[in-house]
């Protein structure tokens, strides 16, 4: 598992630097508790979070079950990179020490975790799993789009309700701290929530003689979480390194030639480690033993992934489905094909 707040050194001016200490635990730990989430079993919750947890036990169960989904998406997005969103076993912080620093990896995890809660709760509301929400009650009557008028119908995903609850719960800890790292986390939390809403789409069903579509019934549907993950991954690539402004109320770019970060940008304070070797202080687990691609020229190449340490090659036998044919009606028959393949893994640090 994984997590991020702790100490972070940040500049308000060239000469001034403060280190803040944070409780190294998070609501992310709910993912290890699953449906057995109990408010008092989650270390590090502030009073506001614990209060919401006790008031909405079924919501918390949904959130706990949904943690694995956004962590899985994080690991998918970084599966071919030195940092692969790895989690720390039996660690209340979920991500160990890796995200204690205000790096762009920390920015991504805060954003996708906030987005993940919004997505989970929106889906739970629409599926009738929660007694505090259902479909969006505001989508009633008639409206218009580029194709003309339509009637609201079906079940519009109530994303605004999920955003409101997520903001109240997730941001509670950062609003209590109100230091530079808290402001960074709040910014990235908000960017994650907004990313889910970006992929809401209008879906419609036509009614009329011979499919003439003289009448349309429409509803707003949430996009697949992969769209949100892909979008936030691009935001990670273009994340803005920032420093606090002189008043301690917001950010400005760390480099004068760059513009002030926008609301959709991810922001970070500190440069990332190279993640090549195991390092207890930074929380890096290194890339020893990671599978690499010998013929690639990208981030998953053995040269890049292994940081120049070299790699070991082993031959393994694989079985896969092949020569699949469709048979009327209605089955697909395949053969089991066996092949010998070479697997390359990075050497450990010497």
Image (spheres, grey):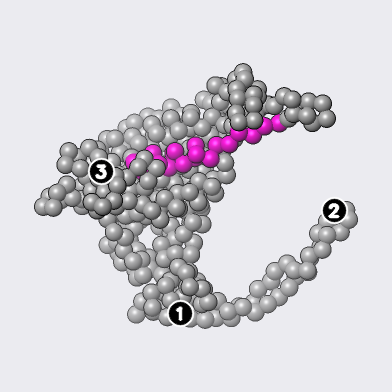
Alpha-carbon span between mark 3 and mark 1:
42 Å
Disc 3 and disc 1 in contact, CB within 8 angstroms: no
Q: Nearer the viewer, mark 3 or mark 1?
A: 3
Label 3 SS: strand
Label 1 SS: strand
- The disc placed on residue 145 is none
Residue 292 locus on image (x, y percent): 49, 72
Depicted 1 relative to depicted 289: above or below: above
Alpha-carbon span between mark 2 and mark 3:
60 Å
Task: Decide: few, some or many residues near mark 3? Use Cα within 10 Å; few <14, some 14-19, many ≥20.
Answer: many
Q: Where is mark 2, residue-wise?
A: 330
Is 103 situated left or right of 206 in this image? left
The reply to whether residue 102 is in sight is no
Is 127 situated left or right of 175 in this image? right
Q: Residue furthest right?
A: 328
Q: Earlier in the sequence, mark 1 or mark 2?
A: 1
Part of the protein shown in magenta: 187-205
Label 2 SS: loop
Q: Residue at x 51, y 77 (%)?
A: 294
Q: Where is mark 1, residue-wise?
A: 311
Q: Residue at x 57, y 44 (%)?
A: 224
Q: Where is mark 3, residue-wise?
A: 251
The reply to whether residue 340 is in sight is yes
Q: Residue at x 23, y 41 (%)?
A: 179
């Amino acid at each position: 598992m994984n997590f991020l707040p702790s100490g972070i050194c940040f500049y308000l001016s060239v000469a001034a630097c403060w280190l803040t200490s944070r409780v190294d635990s998070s609501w992310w730990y709910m993912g290890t508790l699953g449906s057995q989430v109990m408010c008092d079993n989650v270390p590090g919750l502030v009073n506001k979070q614990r209060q919401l947890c006790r008031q909405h036990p079924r919501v918390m169960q949904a959130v706990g079950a949904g943690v694995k989904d956004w962590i899985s998406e994080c690991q998918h997005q970084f599966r071919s990179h030195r940092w692969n969103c790895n989690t720390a076993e039996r660690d209340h912080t979920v991500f160990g020490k890796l995200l204690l620093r205000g790096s762009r990896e920390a920015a991504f995890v805060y954003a996708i975790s906030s987005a993940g809660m919004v997505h989970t709760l929106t889906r739970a509301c629409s599926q009738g799993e929660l007694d505090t929400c259902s479909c969006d009650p505001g989508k009633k009557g008639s409206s218009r789009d580029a194709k003309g008028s339509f009637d609201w119908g079906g079940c519009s995903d109530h994303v605004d309700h999920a955003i409101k609850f997520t903001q109240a719960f997730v941001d509670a800890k950062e609003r209590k701290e109100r230091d530079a790292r808290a402001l960074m986390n709040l910014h990235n939390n908000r960017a994650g929530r907004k990313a889910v809403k970006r992929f809401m789409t209008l879906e419609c069903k036509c009614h009329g003689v011979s499919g003439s579509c003289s009448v349309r019934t429409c509803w707003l549907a949430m996009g697949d979480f992969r769209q949100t993950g892909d979008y936030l991954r691009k935001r990670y690539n273009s994340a803005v390194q920032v420093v606090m402004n002189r008043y301690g109320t917001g950010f400005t770019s760390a480099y004068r030639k760059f513009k002030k970060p926008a609301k959709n940008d991810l922001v970070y304070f500190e440069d990332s480690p190279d993640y090549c070797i195991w390092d207890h202080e930074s929380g890096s687990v290194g890339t020893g033993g990671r599978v690499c691609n010998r013929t690639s020229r990208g981030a998953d190449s053995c040269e890049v992934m292994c940081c120049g340490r070299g790699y070991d090659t082993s031959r393994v036998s694989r079985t896969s489905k092949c020569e699949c044919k469709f048979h009327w009606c209605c089955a697909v028959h395949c053969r089991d094909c066996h092949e010998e393949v070479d697997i390359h893994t990075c050497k450990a640090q010497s």
